[in-house]
Structure formats: C-alpha cells, structure tokens
Image (cartoon, helix red, strand yellow):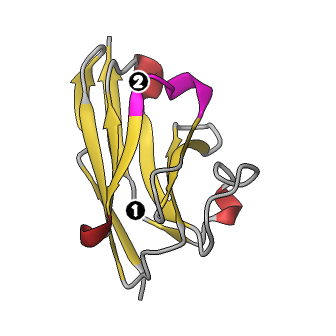
Amino acid sequence: QVQLVESGGGSVQAGGSLRLSCSVSGYTYSSKCMGWFRQAPGKEREGVGSISTAGNYTYYVDSVKDRFTISQDNAANTVYLQMHSVKPEDTAMYYCAAQLNVCRFITWNVPNAFRYWGQGTQVTVSS
C-alpha cells in the first residue's frame, strides 16, 4: 500500500521560511514524478512544483520560482519543499503527490495525473 505523509507545516510570519517533507512508502521510488500541490479554501488545487525521482529535474509555478525549492533524498524516499520568503498568499494546505511515470511538462501540475496523495499539511503565513 502506497502511503505519502507530509510534515513540517505550521504558522509563519511573512518573509520567513518553512521546510515541508513528504515521506513515501510502498512505492518504487524510481522513474517517477513527485509533486507538491496546495489548496486554499474555495480555490482549486494548484501545482507548486514537481521533481523527477530519477534526477533533479524540477518544475515550478511562476509564483514560487526563486522562493521555493524542491529537493529529494532518494535513499530515504523523501521529497522536500523548502519555502523561503513566504507570503500571505502562500497560505494553503500543502499536499505531496506521486505519479506512476516520470514528470512531463504538460502534466507536472495536473492533479489528475497524480495517482497517490498525502493527507496534507497546513501552512499559514501571517503578515
């Protein structure tokens, strides 16, 4: 059974930093795509970024480029989202997700392309 468990969320002041983690189990961690999504109340789920488990190919939504960084520890089957210079608009529930295939330019941020999902971890940024 595949399980994805996020951690590291919390409350932070604007301009601060947080590091989210996603621990994956029951999943062949190779030639896959791991993504981070976020969803604020009343809004659609948005792709934040993704990373190839076969390397360090990454994708980011424009609004977080130069502020957020996705990384991974392949041996630990863990994906991270390092968040710097956070803004109030970053407030959302953050989810990690996994595809069955490698990341693709056209699907890295498409929720339906991701087969497995974590339970989410809340990030709240105050001004």
For the N terminus, give its image quadrant.
bottom left
Indicate whether 10 appears above or below 96.
above
Circle 2 packing at 10 Å, graded few (<14), some (14-19), many (20+), is: some
Indicate whether 27 appears above or below 31.
below
Please tell me which residue is depicted at 33% across the width and 31% down the height of the picture: 83
For residue 104, what is the image quadrant? Answer: bottom right
As rendered, which of 81 and 87 lies closer to the eye? 81
> Which type of secondary structure does the marked residue at label 1 adopt?
loop
Residue 59 falls within the magenta-colored stretch: no
| Magenta part of the chain | 61-68
Residue 64 falls within the magenta-colored stretch: yes
Please tell me which residue is depicted at 45% across the width and 22% down the height of the picture: 66
| Residue sitting farthest toward the bottom | 1
For residue 75, what is the image quadrant? Answer: bottom left
Q: Which residue is mark 1?
A: 119
| 45 horizontally vs 52: left or right | right
Gap between marks 2 and 1 measured at Cα: 24 Å
| Residue sitting farthest toward the right | 106
Circle 1 packing at 10 Å, graded few (<14), some (14-19), many (20+), is: some
Q: Position of residue 44 (x, y in %)?
A: 65, 42
| 6 horizontally vs 41: left or right | left
Please tell me which residue is depicted at 23% across the width and 47% down the height of the picture: 8
Q: Position of residue 42 (x, y in %)?
A: 61, 37
| 81 horizontally vs 100: left or right | left
Q: Which residue is mark 2?
A: 67
Q: Position of residue 59 (x, y in %)?
A: 57, 42
Amino acid carrying label 2: it is Arg
For the C terminus, give its image quadrant.
top left
Q: Position of residue 37 (x, y in %)?
A: 52, 47
Please tell me which residue is depicted at 40% across the width and 44% down the height of the picture: 70
| Residue sitting farthest toward the front | 55
